[in-house]
Each structure stands twice: as structure tokens, then as C-alpha cells.
Image: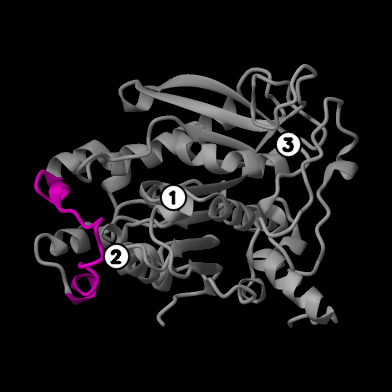
Amino acid sequence: MKRFVSLGKVGIVMFLLVACNPSAATLPQSTETTQPKPPATATVLQVSPEPAAFTLSEKGPYHVGTRTFSFNDANRDGRYVSITVWYPAVQPGDSTSKGPSFDADPDFSSAPYPLILSDTKNAKLFAPYLVSHGFAWASVDGIDTWGPQMDVGMIDQPLDILFMLDRVASSPPEGLEGMINAEQVGVIGYSFSGYNTLALSGARIDPEYYLAQCPNPDATTEAILTALSAFDCPPSGPWDEFVAHAGDAITTSEDGMWQPMTDERIRAVIPMAGEGWWLFGERGLAAVDRPVLIIAGTQDKLYPENALIYEHLGTHDKAMISFVGDGHMVMVSDYDHIARLAHFATAFFGYHLQGREDYAEYFSEDFVAQCDDLFYGVYDK
């Protein structure tokens, strides 16, 4: 049910400006200090129940620390995996910077913190926001592209993220023991990493459907090929090599589809401007079984694919927020867009991982409807 308040003419104008433009008004600033933080009950950000502003686009009360680590995955021929961990921290006494501080002392006041996973390129954009609101974050370095063609990165990168989750859960980085709640995990990714995020949602690769698309796509895929820049068939040539690289544990099943590359500890995911329809197909997407929030710009060449993915997700707990008129790169190259994306990510993960029921308003249809340049669901106007 929508809420109505009497604002007067000036108030109505300001209400709309604040609701639809994070930079149009002064919102709560970070409460970072050089002193230790008070108990957890005092550090939780209090948010107005009225969905009147992108309140969560502002950084929260925690300073952000980072540390880097590297490991070798013995189960994949010693594959090297470098990770960056982002965590709530005590701001160093000799620093006035509001940016992340390398190797800062962890802030245990509300630990353990739910964990977000991504590649490091996306983490650099969004971790400083979400970690300041009481999340831990782990990101794999150097996995933000496949190169000129789709390749075994479609297998390796989701597995890198799962390997990172296992390491952080079973052997927390030294000095961060007790900081991370690895039982409440979210995954987020943009563009190429949107595929990784979708793969970690429980979606299953459907070889029969994928191979049938190469080189002659069916009517469903053909209808969006003019906009589907991600559609690429190179793996279909050396398919046996592609299957061998994935391994029997993933490719063996009774129904012909691959096993999902996911983990039950992953509770919610946000694929942004991603891809994967042609690889998962309708059957593979029907296997998605956890909350999903899809975000994409309506002028993105990948938008028709994102709409198709959204419509076929098997989970009933799904939402899509469309940025009207925005193309692919605008979303992550403009401060206001990044701040809005951070707001929705904080709200979505706060609701599903932190148990903040009041955050549901901040990614709801009523909230989105306040802004002319946003649309809740698939935009077909």
C-alpha cells in the first residue's frame, strides 16, 4: 500500500528530487571516526520507513579495510586464485581518508558480517558502499573478462568464486577470524560477471539447447540475436574439450543438464546487465531456486536477453529493475548510477542476509515507481 504525506508544493518538488536523484539532496553521511565504535546496537543504520530517498546510496557507519591473499586450488591442478577481502574496520588514527584502508584493524562490534562475493573489478565499485553498511566482501582478482570469445572462463570463473567461498569459510584469513558469516552469502556481478552471478544462482547449463543454437538458433533466440552481442558459438566446436575441462562432477547427470555451479550457502544473487540465456535455456533457468534481483538498462544491447532470463527464472522470489534509456556502460561509469545500484544492492542483501525487513521497501515496486527513469519489471514501452 502506498503512503501519502502532505508536503505542500515545495515539499513535493524536493520529495521527487530526493527520491529520484541521490545527489539532489544532502543525505546522511558516514559516521566514520578515528575512535573505536560503540556497541553494535548503536552502529546499525536507522532508515526512515518512507521510501522517499535513495538513503542507502550513502555510505554507512563503518570504515572499510582491505587485505589480499592468494591460494592454489589443488582440485584444479593448483590453479592460482588471488583474492581481496573487504571488511568493516576501525579507521586508522593517522588517516582522514574515507576510502578503504589497506590492512586496517577489523571492527568486531557487530561481527560476524554476512558475506558478498564477486570479482574485484565489481568490488572496487560497490564494496566500499556495502561493507560500510555491515557486510564482509571477498572478491577474486583478475576475472572480469573472457577475452574476445567465450571460453573456459565460463567454467573457471564461477569455480574460482566457489573456491574463494570455501577458503574464507574454512580457513578465514589471518586476523579476520570471527569477522565473516559464510553461512549468509550473496553474489553480485555486472556485465561478464553477471553471467558468473547467474551461474551461481543455481542455473544449469543445458548442452542440448546450447548446441542446437550453434550455428542455427531457434525462434526464441533468433528474435533477440540483433541485440544479443553475447551469443557466441566457439565452445560448440571443441565441445568435448570444453566438457573435459568442466569435469565429470559438473557434467554428469541423469537429465542431460550440467550440475549447478553453486553452493547452498549462497542465499541471494544480483546479476546486473549479464548474459547466459543461450547457455542455460529455459530448462536451465528453471533450476534457479533462490532470490534474484536483475538490474539492466533498457538501451543496453543485452536488455532483451536480461528480460528473457528474468521471465524464465524458476524462483518465485525474483524482481527486475530497469533503468530506462540507459546503455551498458552508463550504469557503471556515472557516480549517480553507481550510487543507485549500491542502494538497491544494500537493500536487497540487507533484507535477505541481514534480516532487515524494513529494507524491503527500498527495492520495492512502490519505491521504483517514484522515479520516471526507473521501471519495475520488463520495460516494453
* Residue identifier under label 3: 112
Label the magenta part by its dominant secondary structure: loop
| Left-right relation of 202 to 219 | right
Quadrant of the image for the C terminus? Answer: bottom left
Instruction: Name the residue located 40 percent from the left edge and 52 percent from the top edge.
Output: 329
Q: Is residue 232 magenta?
A: yes
| Amino acid at pointer 1 | Tyr
**Crowd tier of the residue under label 1, counting other residues whose Cα lies within 10 Å: few below 14, some 14–19, many 20 or above:** many
Q: At numbered mark 2, what does the secondary structure look like: helix, strand or loop?
A: helix
Q: Mark 2 or mark 3: which comes first in sequence?
A: 3
Disc 2, disc 3: CB below 8 Å? no
| Left-right relation of 67 to 223 | right
Residue mark closest to the camera, 1 vs 3? 1
The image quarter in which residue 173 lies? top right
| Left-right relation of 136 to 243 | right
Residue 218 percent location from the top left of the image: 16, 72
* Residue identifier under label 1: 190
Image: magenta residue range: 219-239
Q: Mark 1 or mark 2: which comes first in sequence?
A: 1
| Amino acid at pointer 3 | Pro
